[in-house]
Amino acid sequence: MDFADFISKKAIRPQLTATDKEGAIREMVQALLDAGEIAEDQFDGIVQKVLDREELGSTGIGRGVAVPHTKHPSVEKLCGAVAVSESGVEFASLDGDPVYLLFLLVSPPDRPGDHLRALENVSRRLRDDQFCRFLRQSKTPDDIWQLLEEADNNQFGA
Amino acid sequence: MFLIDTLILATGVLLLLGIVSSKVSSRLGVPVLVLFLMIGMLAGSEGIGGIEFENYRLAHAIGTVALALILFDGGLSTSMSSVRLAWKPAAMLATVGVLITSVVVGVAAMWVLGVSPLQGLLLGSIVGSTDAAAVFSVLRSGGVNLSRRLTSVLELESASNDPMAIFLTIGCIELLLGRMSPGVGLLGLFVAQMAIGTLCGLIGGYVAAWVVDRIELDASGMYPVLVTASCFLTFGMATHLGGSGYLAVYLAGLVIGNRPLVFKRGVRAYHDSLAWLSQIVMFVVLGLLCFPSRLWAVSGKALLLSAVLILVARPLAVVVSTLPFKFSWRETVFISWVGLKGAVPITLATFPLMFATPDHALQAAVLFDVVFFIVVVSAVVQGAGLTPAARWLGLEHPPAPVAPVTLEISSLKHVEGEVVDYAVSADSRAAGRKVKNLGLPEGAVIAMIARGTQIIPPQGATRVEAGDHVILVLRPRMRTLVNRVFAPAGDSDGALTPSFEFPLRAATTVGELIELYQLPLEGPSDRTLVEAISQHFGRYAELGDSVCYGTVTLRVDRVGDGGVVEIIAMSVVTEPPASRPVGKKKPPSKDAKPGPGPVA
């Protein structure tokens, strides 16, 4: 599963303003809303579901990366948003460091395989330090989109 | 020639023999401390050395100083995380465990030696504690890898149970001499020993660390001496105030060793040497003190008591004191086996000799010989059997990822970073790879590669070869990631994880995971992940346990107090990476990388 299969091009936020977990998640769900991926009346419900998942354990998985995710019945297909924070978001990561790269995934309940494949793809790609470094230095949604495409085409290691 | 000249010569010879004997100890499968004792016995009045030595007070004095230094060093080299991991079971073993061991051996001694109950208990108390020096040296140099929890429990127990044994011994002697009545007075003695010892140790440790950090000495060689001074100060303060000096120095060492200290590695190396010196001196002196012919006279009875101690008393004590902590039966058996006796019992056995009066002979001489015999049997049998026991019980762990030698940046101020020397083994992940392909994290730079006698300035295309020493400059907290780069390839612990892991609280339920990820988990939905993993292994989950559920792997990632699982890491691997045909969707971008400059 490629980034292009689930990341919405219009839901890329190179300059995240929030510095706390809930704020960052709200901003990213808003990005999905702006991109037309989710319905307006579902906004609060989705934010709450993402925060519920965080209760099981932070999705801040270390090295400045967070992959908040959840399932929600209102979405028809897997959709995702990407955000880059310059100042860092306090995300209660296991290593205690703030996160700078965030990938939000919302999946429909009936497609568990896609959900896991997307999670795996994101976490595998983010292992590449060069990819992460370029993402963090990106200034525009187009830059980020291009990087995601290059990752899809195995331009980065692993 | 002065007497001291002869003494110096003899000391030199004995120390040298001690060091040489350590070279053969692993080949003989005998703990090195037994060899030290042998050397002392050979040098003694009945051996070839013919050195007359029967000064119990001096022996006790030497034993006390040596033990203090050994325990202090033990504290210095114990990390806080292993304390957190193991302190509860260790504390139980060090108190309740010692008491049970002492009572059982005491009852046996009453019957075997035909002495009064109290006299029997005195013997039991003397041999009640496991020896820190013996356990540390066997566990750390015995070539056997155990789980961290098990090692921590054993080391902590042996380091902290001496005060209990000392207290019981002194208590028995006081009672036998009729100077104290059982009850409140005895309990007060115990509380004072523990409380004052703890307090002095903590205060001593913090004050010492604070002073070392701020004193700014000109000569770096004085820092280790300063730390030694704090060890003696702490011991002296604690004992003068009526506390346990041994407990105090152990705690002080623990505090100091876990603080960022100026010249820390120098301090550690120095105290490690001091501890070795102390061990050799102490055991040789104790060997000098004993008379093999008298040992022979008590051998039958002492052998019987050793058997009771090893086969009955210790296992019973371990089973009872670890009951609340969910150890597997294999671990319980192993902990029972590692009840090595050492210098503490022999030192304690000199107490009755010193306190004996014409009215109360305390049967001190017989006691000393029996104790000596039991210690030798315990050290030889249990020490030599330790590695086979670990293997037989299946408790051996694969060795941890190569422990790299760390060099110290020679600065007397704090430097935020490290210089680390990795020795590249043939099976290391890094061997045969080019520097640019190592995948070093940001914040880690190779400063040089030493190959044979050559120094190679590293470049991107330089190939790292087996046998190289790669010296890196690291920012703080980069060690774990870099360790993985250099770890052996087959070592799953050090492997670059196939994907990132998501931490989950241990209390997360099966139902919650199924709801989110539709995993093929079984069992009631309100069962927690720890319970699911525990059920899979048929015992309580341990650090590193991992279970695969379809495309998701759950691994026990963090264990807290008393072995309670805190964090379970979830990783997802759905397909082997990079097996997809390239260019399936869109042609690769021909543009330059956006934003950032050229690749470094």
Image (cartoon, coloured by chain):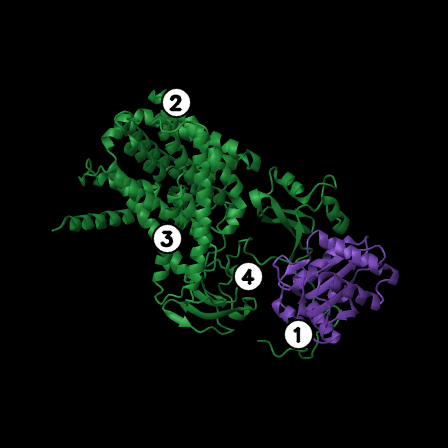
Chain colours: A purple, B green
Chain of the residue displaying label 2: B
Chain of the residue displaying label 4: B
In the shown orientation, is residue B32 left or right of residue A4? left
For label 4, the residue is B481
Q: Name the front one of labels 2 and 3.
A: 2
Q: Amino acid under label 2? A: Pro
Disc 1, SS: helix
Q: Position of residue B12 (x, y in %)?
A: 22, 50
For label 2, the residue is B117
Picture disc at residue B272? 3
**Label 1 Cα neighbours within 10 Å, binned few <14 / some 14-19 / many ≥20:** some
In the shown orientation, is residue B161 left or right of residue A38? left
Q: Do marks 2 and 3 share a chain?
A: yes
Chain of the residue displaying label 3: B
- Marks 3 and 4, how far apart at CA: 28 Å
Residue B412 lies in what quarter of the image?
A: bottom left
Q: Nearer the viewer, residue B197 or B10?
A: B197
Q: Residue at x 76, y 53 (%)?
A: A52
- Quadrant showing the C terminus of chain B: bottom right
Above/below status of B544 relative to B375 = below
Q: Name the front one of labels 3 and 4.
A: 3
